[in-house]
């Protein structure tokens, strides 16, 4: 049962070889067994899941199967789910039950999906390790070969989503990416994940972090499963003013296209000091696979890449400081009483937000404050324009880019935590695509010497996820990545 | 670079986040370090570059100016920490 990919489970369900109730029950049992250790889910909704599974079985019996009918998924706890507590990984929302459903999760329900529960994440999606969640850290199901006792992080912010998929506690999951929060955890957990073009998925009902960067996407076991999920999640939504009014292509069909005749760029700037030679070697191997499949490899330059991360740490906190102003203890969420209204606000926010969220709100408030706006925020927006210009120039010559997803494999809890900037460096290869709004996908491509998964990142032109899927699927086929994590359902 | 205590207090006040005296020194150095790291952006020549506000690269749509949603106070107030009738309740603002 746990060996089925999402596409295989869909086919088995349609052929009535298995029922959604059996499948859902198996996943719920696995969650009950493994979640106390992994903490990938904040909230599990068994009754709701089984009711959805029964409805799916009835639909399938009547020949009414849709794209995801009966498929059990995890939903990142940043997507508002009607009647099911949605925390954003924060104490300030620990009692928040949305009276509405996010557009992305509603699209999945429309297509017949079963929701197992809400996946853990860094608080307000701010983090690269899932260590900032108010609901506890998530354990990466992978283990170092030489040290099975070390508890590794799953990456972040979509750490619960990625760990759940890797440990086979869901067939796929929703995730969100603001600076790398889909791609980095996918890489750390040995699974696939795509951040589509900004505007491809509606942000309506997704708890906002940095609105000009936030974008929803799927994580799943393989590239095709991601394509199936994105096909359901994506689509125009009048309720999101930045939603793109464009038809959703057949992403799954694009996976089979191949790369013959495509030009793949290799950006010179995607390296950093202290990066392991294994990752450089894997990158070279990935380029070799694409060349063997008929692609032409082209050296390119994205000169402003090196400023991406610092630019991000102005733009994202600035937007966050504005977005998170709504958490004031008045209309919803946690409240601390105070002497007067201002004191209520200040005590509520001091008690409700964790250290990293406060840090980013403070940075954002500072860079937007009188006298600093031009020096920080306006300058960052200009550099953001230069980062986009780099990509636009390069995409005049190539169809897609190949880079490593992360500068290292998964690290252990406690590592990289002594200084916020060390943690921020995790996103050095993922942030530029977020700044430019272009699609990016991480695909598992190999193991390091410790036996931990490493991902390669495919970047594409705006709204050309199809090419991203075809390149990623080609790498996936060539890599033949079949290793499974030590901790998983059915093991 | 470290921020001075008055600046940390000013920012936390603007951000409406209560900061205890004991937390100030750590914030001074942490925020200062991040802002110091960001200084690297000063070496980029941005002369004549138009700022990019978002990744959408599109003009925002206009919609009909009509009410399309609402009229369910119970739903709106369902998560309120405190309410009085169909209103959110807060400590007294005006004496």
Image (cartoon, coloured by chain):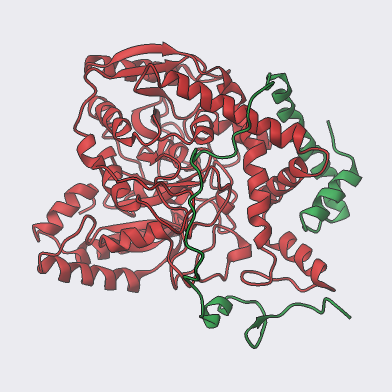
Chain colours: A red, B green
Viewer-proximal residue among B54 and A162? B54
- In this view, which residue lies farthest toward the front? B64
Is A348 displayed left or right of A320 in the figure?
Answer: right
Residue at the image point whose x is 64% and y is 25% from the top = B49
What x and y, as percent, mark residue A89? Answer: 55, 57
Image position of A163 with respect to A30: above or below:
above
Residue A128 image offset from top left, x and y in percent: 55, 41
Provide residue A76's location: percent of width, then percent of height.
Answer: 44, 55
Where on the picture, by quarter, is residue B33? top right
The structure residue drawn at horizontal position 59% and vertical position 57%, both measured from the top left corner, is A134
Give the vertical position of A180 relative to A475 (above or below).
below
Place of residue A363 in the rendered image (x, y in percent of width and height, measured from the top left): 73, 43
Q: Quadrant of residue A278?
A: top left
The image quadrant where one finds the N terminus of chain A is: bottom left
In the rendered structure, the answer to whether residue A171 lies left or right of residue A408 reads: left
Q: How many marks?
A: 0
User: Image point 18% across, 54% down: which residue?
Assistant: A10
Horizontal side of A16 relative to A134 (left or right) equals left
Left or right? Give the position of A238 relative to A210.
left
Relative depth, front residue between A415 and A207: A207
């Amino acid at each position: 049962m746990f060996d089925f990919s999402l596409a295989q489970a869909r086919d088995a369900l349609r052929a009535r070889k298995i029922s959604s109730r059996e499948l859902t029950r198996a996943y719920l049992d696995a969650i009950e067994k493994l979640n106390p250790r992994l903490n990938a889910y904040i909230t599990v909704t068994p009754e709701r899941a089984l009711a959805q599974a029964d409805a799916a079985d009835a639909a399938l019996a009547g020949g009414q199967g849709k794209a995801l009918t009966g498929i059990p998924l995890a939903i990142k706890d940043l997507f508002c789910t009607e009647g099911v507590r949605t925390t954003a990984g924060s104490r300030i929302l620990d009692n928040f039950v949305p009276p509405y459903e996010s557009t992305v999760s509603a699209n999945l329900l429309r297509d017949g999906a079963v929701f197992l529960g809400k996946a853990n994440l860094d608080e307000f999606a701010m983090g690269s390790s899932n260590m900032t969640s108010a609901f506890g850290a998530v354990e990466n199901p992978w283990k170092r070969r030489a040290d099975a006792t070390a508890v590794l992080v799953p990456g972040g912010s979509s750490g619960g989503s990625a760990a759940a998929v890797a440990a086979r506690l869901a067939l796929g999951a929703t995730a969100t990416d603001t600076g790398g929060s889909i791609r980095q955890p996918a890489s750390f957990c040995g699974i696939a994940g795509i951040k589509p073009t900004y505007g491809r998925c509606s942000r309506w009902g997704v708890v906002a972090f940095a609105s000009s960067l936030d974008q929803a996407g799927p994580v799943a076991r393989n590239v095709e499963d991601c394509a199936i999920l994105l096909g359901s999640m994506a689509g125009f939504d009048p309720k999101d003013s930045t939603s793109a009014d464009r038809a959703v292509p057949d992403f799954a069909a694009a996976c089979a296209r191949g790369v013959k005749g495509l030009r793949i760029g290799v950006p010179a700037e995607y390296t950093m000091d202290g990066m392991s030679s294994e990752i450089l070697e894997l990158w070279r191997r990935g380029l070799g696979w694409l060349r063997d499949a008929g692609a032409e490899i082209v050296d390119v330059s994205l000169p402003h890449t090196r400023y991406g991360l610092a630019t991000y740490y102005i733009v994202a906190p600035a937007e966050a400081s504005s977005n998170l102003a709504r958490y004031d203890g008045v209309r919803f969420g946690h409240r601390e009483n105070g002497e007067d209204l201002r004191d209520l606000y200040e005590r509520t926010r001091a008690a409700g937000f964790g250290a990293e969220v406060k840090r980013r709100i403070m940075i954002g408030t500072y860079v937007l404050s009188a006298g600093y706006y031009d020096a920080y925020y306006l300058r960052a927006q200009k550099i953001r324009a230069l980062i986009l210009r780099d990509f636009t120039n390069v995409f005049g010559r190539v169809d897609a880019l190949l880079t490593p997803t992360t500068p290292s494999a998964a690290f252990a809890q406690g590592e990289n935590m002594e200084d916020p900037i060390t943690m921020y460096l995790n996103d050095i290869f993922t942030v530029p695509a977020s700044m430019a709004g272009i699609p990016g996908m991480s695909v598992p491509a190999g193991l390091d010497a410790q036996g931990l998964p490493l991902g390669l990142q495919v970047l594409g032109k705006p709204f050309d996820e199809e090419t991203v899927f075809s390149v990623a699927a080609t790498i996936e086929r060539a890599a033949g990545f079949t290793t499974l994590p030590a901790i998983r359902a059915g093991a | 670079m470290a921020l001075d205590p008055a600046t940390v207090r000013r920012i936390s006040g603007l951000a409406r986040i209560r900061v205890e005296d004991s937390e100030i020194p750590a914030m001074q150095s942490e925020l200062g370090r991040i802002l110091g790291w960001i200084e690297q952006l000063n070496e980029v020549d941005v002369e004549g570059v138009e700022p990019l506000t978002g990744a959408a690269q599109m003009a925002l749509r206009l919609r009909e100016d009509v009410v399309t949603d609402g009229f369910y106070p119970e739903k709106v107030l369902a998560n309120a920490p405190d309410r009085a009738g169909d209103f959110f309740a807060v400590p007294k603002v005006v004496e």
